[in-house]
């Protein structure tokens, strides 16, 4: 069983979604059986989890804090609830409220439970502590292989 951690941006530009979806599908193609380890944040986490479940993988959910659902809105909250219901296991961290510390600890836990990590990441610095760049750096410091997926020439801040 291979555990594949997920980290990535919450806002993926629409023009990047097709290529990101294709490259995640390719990255998971030869790995069976596998478990996706994710906090199911909006964007990359939910996208990878959905693809992984469609490909027959299992899901291990890491919940950063007790009030985590309050950080999600609209479609992201609906997707979270749908995907969380499909998790084969859920682990809750001891934080009560959402915070950068809770998010970083969740990212570390994802990495610590994973054999490798898929990062939907533009390669730029994190906007706040616990962002994608921080989790990627932690994964690399722990010797995990990190598969970075991001379309060339796409600016994350563009529509």
Image: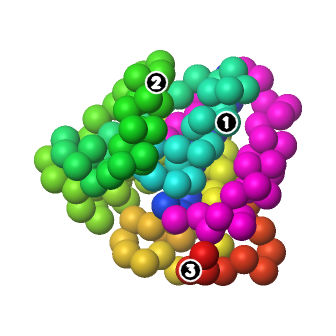
Q: Which residues are magenta?
A: 11-39
Above or below residue 136? Residue 72 is above
Asked if the magenta segment contains residue 32, the reply would be yes
Residue at mark 1 to residue at mark 2: CA–CA distance: 14 Å
Q: Where does label 3 land, which residue?
A: 157
Q: Which residue is mark 1?
A: 51
Q: Position of residue 55 (x, y in %)?
A: 72, 26
- Rendered view: 9 above or below 70: below
In which image quadrant can residue 116 be found? Answer: top right
Who comes first in sequence, dot 1 or dot 2? Answer: 1
Q: Is residue 11 above or below residue 48?
A: below
Crowd around label 2: few <14 · some 14–19 · many ≥20 (10 Å): some
Determine the CA span between mark 3 and mark 1. Answer: 24 Å
In terms of depth relative to the viewer, which is nearer, 57 or 2?
Answer: 57
For label 2, the residue is 87
Q: Which mark lies nearer to you, 1 or 2?
A: 1
Q: Residue at x 79, y 58 (%)?
A: 19
- Where disc 2 sits, the SS reads loop
Secondary structure, mark 3, is loop
Dot 1: few (<14), some (14–19), or many (≥20) neighbours within 10 Å?
A: some
Mark 3 and mark 2 in contact (Cβ < 8 Å)?
Answer: no
């Amino acid at each position: 069983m291979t555990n594949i951690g997920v980290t990535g941006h919450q806002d993926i530009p629409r023009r990047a979604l097709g290529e990101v979806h294709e490259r995640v599908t390719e990255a998971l193609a030869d790995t069976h059986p596998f478990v996706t380890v994710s906090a199911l944040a909006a964007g990359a986490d939910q996208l990878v989890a959905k693809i992984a479940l469609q490909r027959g993988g299992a899901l291990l959910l890491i919940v950063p804090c007790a009030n985590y659902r309050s950080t999600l809105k609209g479609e992201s909250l609906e997707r979270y609830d749908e995907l969380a219901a499909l998790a084969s296991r859920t682990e809750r961290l001891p934080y009560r409220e959402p915070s950068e510390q809770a998010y970083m600890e969740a990212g570390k836990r994802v990495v610590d439970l994973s054999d490798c990590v898929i990062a939907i990441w533009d390669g730029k610095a994190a906007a706040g502590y616990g962002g994608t760049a921080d989790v990627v750096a932690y994964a690399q410091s722990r010797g995990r292989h990190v598969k970075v997926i991001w379309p060339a020439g796409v600016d994350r801040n563009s529509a």
